[in-house]
């Protein structure tokens, strides 16, 4: 259902449309038929910020309404394609890294000071928490 902007006058509706589609505020203000004034343009943008945001969301929804739903397999396939066929080495390395993360091969560094949280993290990784804590205490002493 299209966004209802009937409470705005035609110039304001045009301004909302232009800003939502990426025009600079001052350019949209003048293009909508207002007398160019950057202060007034900024004030109008602030006043209509909810309408502008709603219009942006409407435009994005319309643009992607027929896009296929992203699936994990699509992500993996795309990353694998980049990892093997990327034009730059840095692109290939980044794709392999992201692919490894996607498949759970890498764990980002986690920091915790809560013993209960630490125990849960260790056990989630299949590590005996009591043994790990004893080893850490031994290494720290």
Image (cartoon, rainbow, N blue to C red):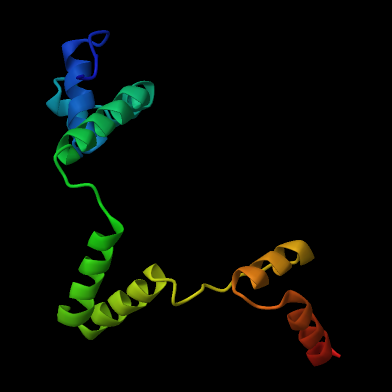
Q: Position of residue 4 (x, y in %)?
A: 24, 14
Q: Position of residue 17 (x, y in %)?
A: 19, 27
Q: Is residue 44 left or right of residue 74?
A: right
Tag count: 0
Residue pictured at 31% horizontal, 79% vertical: 96
Image quadrant in which you'd find residue 102: bottom left
Quadrant housing the N terminus: top left
Q: Is residue 95 left or right of residue 127?
A: left
Whether residue 34 is visible, yes or no, is no
Q: Is residue 9 left or right of residue 54?
A: left
Quadrant housing the C terminus: bottom right
Q: Residue furthest right?
A: 141
Image height check: is 77 above or below 44?
A: below
Q: Position of residue 120 (x, y in %)?
A: 68, 65
Whether residue 106 is visible, yes or no, is yes
Q: Nearer the viewer, residue 46 or 108?
A: 108
Image quadrant in which you'd find residue 124: bottom right
Image height check: is 21 above or below 31?
A: below
Residue pictured at 14% horizontal, 20% vertical: 33
Image height check: is 70 above or below 14?
A: below
Q: Nearer the viewer, residue 42 or 137?
A: 137
Residue pictured at 51% horizontal, 74% vertical: 107
Image height check: is 37 above or below 115?
A: above
């Amino acid at each position: 259902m299209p966004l209802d902007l009937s409470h705005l006058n035609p110039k304001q509706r045009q301004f909302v449309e232009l800003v939502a589609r990426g025009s600079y505020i001052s350019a949209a203000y003048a293009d909508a038929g207002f007398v160019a004034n950057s202060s007034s343009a900024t004030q109008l943008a602030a006043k209509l910020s909810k309408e502008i945001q709603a219009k942006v969301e409407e435009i994005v929804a319309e643009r992607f309404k027929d896009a296929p739903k992203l699936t994990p397999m699509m992500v993996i396939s795309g990353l694998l394609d980049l990892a093997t066929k990327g034009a730059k080495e840095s692109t290939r390395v980044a794709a392999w890294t992201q692919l490894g993360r996607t498949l759970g091969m890498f764990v980002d560094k986690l920091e915790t000071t809560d013993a209960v949280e630490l125990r849960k993290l260790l056990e989630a990784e299949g590590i005996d928490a009591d043994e790990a804590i004893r080893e850490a205490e031994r290494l720290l002493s």
